[in-house]
Image (cartoon, rainbow, N blue to C red):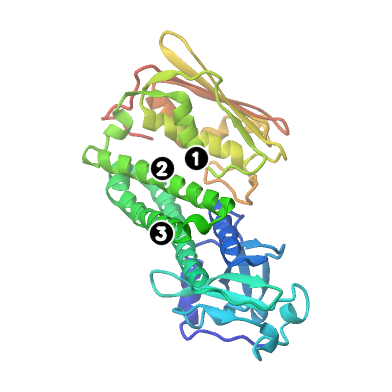
Amino acid sequence: MSYPVPANEEERLDSLDSYDILDTMPENDFDELTHLASEICQTSISAISLIDDKRQWFKSIVGLSSTQTPREQAFCAHTILKPGEIMVIPDARQDSRFASNPLVTGNPNIVFYAGVPLVNEDGFALGSLCVIDTMPKQLTPRQLKSLRILGKQVITQMELRRKLARLERSNQDLLETNSFIQKFASTAAHDIKNPLSSMLLTSQALQQRLGKAADEKSKGLLELNVTSVKRLLTLVDEMLEYSSKPSSLLTNQQSFELVALLKNVVNLIEVPYGMKINFPPLDHALMCSAVALEQIFLNLLTNAVRYNDKEQGVISVQFREDADHYYFKVVDNGMGIAEKNLEKIFYKEVTLNVIDRFNQKGTGLGLYTVKGLVEKLKGTIRAESQIGSGSTFSFSVKKNAGVDEEDDLL
């Protein structure tokens, strides 16, 4: 069985590769969109499908356990041939292109299919957002319109994901040159704000279009999406506000609530289902560089999530203070670190031969960055750990501390 190939196939594959998304772990932002597509179109199956050179790979799928199929069996391989059109197959058994397809004649017995091409800003159709059922079906104009809106949300999410990945790499380089704050605030923040604004507008448009007709689950998913995007837009606006004086992000000392800061950090981390993050039982008002402390916790909590192999992962943040210092602990029940490596982990570009829960290796820059920031805040950091039982990172910060403007950040 052969499959059709777009005229711009080589360039299309290069564009798809630039997203570095194939064979990645499931992500809630994509899963919510597939669930919403299935709810709106009332189908048993929905998927975000990306077409590689030899396969169809699912970034997200509802109703099936498959992660990929051969490209010659992929309905979506036909969808990408016409980037501007939604492909609708009311009954695949009556369509000569698909009647003998194993996915039609056998499990999952596809009958109905509708797919909207995922077209990026360069005009390449990378795959599709599709809905599938095991009985003949027609979508209403309202459902087709909603499916197209959700397809735009998917590609916007992919663009945001790619830009954030590029931003993370650039951020590490800029940290080395002590100019990362200015460039991040003045350029990268604008890059992030555009797709975020698009996501907010399309989500709100979808809320208005569905109105009272949406069920409670769909309303909840949309509200969660709108709330999350608004939070990220607020963070970007804060970065832009500081762009006129780049060093002020880390030098600025301010009063803030510890638990509120920790909640903001956790909202930026993808916490797997079943994992629990505990905050200090009582809130505390702190006075120091909130941005620097947020960066420290972002690194430590991200690592605690990534390197936790337990089914019921638990991470706890502990706090105490004396007259001059704040003291923090981040305790987890994860994989643990060998004793011989406890000092090495803070060295620049030292990576341990450990694969995280997402099948990735670290860059060796995260804890080095944390140590540098802690020391600039007139504090110290150390790690204790036991293989199989977890790790504890303890650090201190001097009260009223900020990074001196003449200091190098690293």
Q: Residue 213 at what x, y percent from top left?
A: 52, 58
Residue 164 appears left or right of 331: left
Q: How far apart are marks 1 and 3 (CA)?
A: 24 Å
- Read off the residue under disc 2: 231
Residue 190 appears left or right of 386: left
Which amino acid, by three-letter code, is at mark 2?
Arg
Please state the total of marks drawn on the protein image.
Answer: 3
Q: Residue at x 46, y 9 (%)?
A: 322
Q: Residue furthest left?
A: 244
Question: Is 209 placed above or below 173 here?
Answer: below
The foreground one among 338 and 250 is 250
Q: Name the quadrant containing residue 92.
A: bottom right
Q: Mark 1 points at which residue?
A: 267
Helix, strand or loop status at disc 3? helix
Residue at image position (33%, 27%) is: 403
**Residues packed near mark 1 inside 10 Å, few (<14), some (14 to 19) or many (20 plus):** few
x and y percent of residue 288 in the render? 36, 22
In front of the other: label 1 or label 2? 2
Disc 3 vs disc 2: Cβ atoms closer than 8 Å?
A: no
Determine the residue positioned at 48% across, 60% down. 210
**Residue at x-position 62% and y-position 76%:** 113
Q: Mark 3 points at which residue?
A: 205
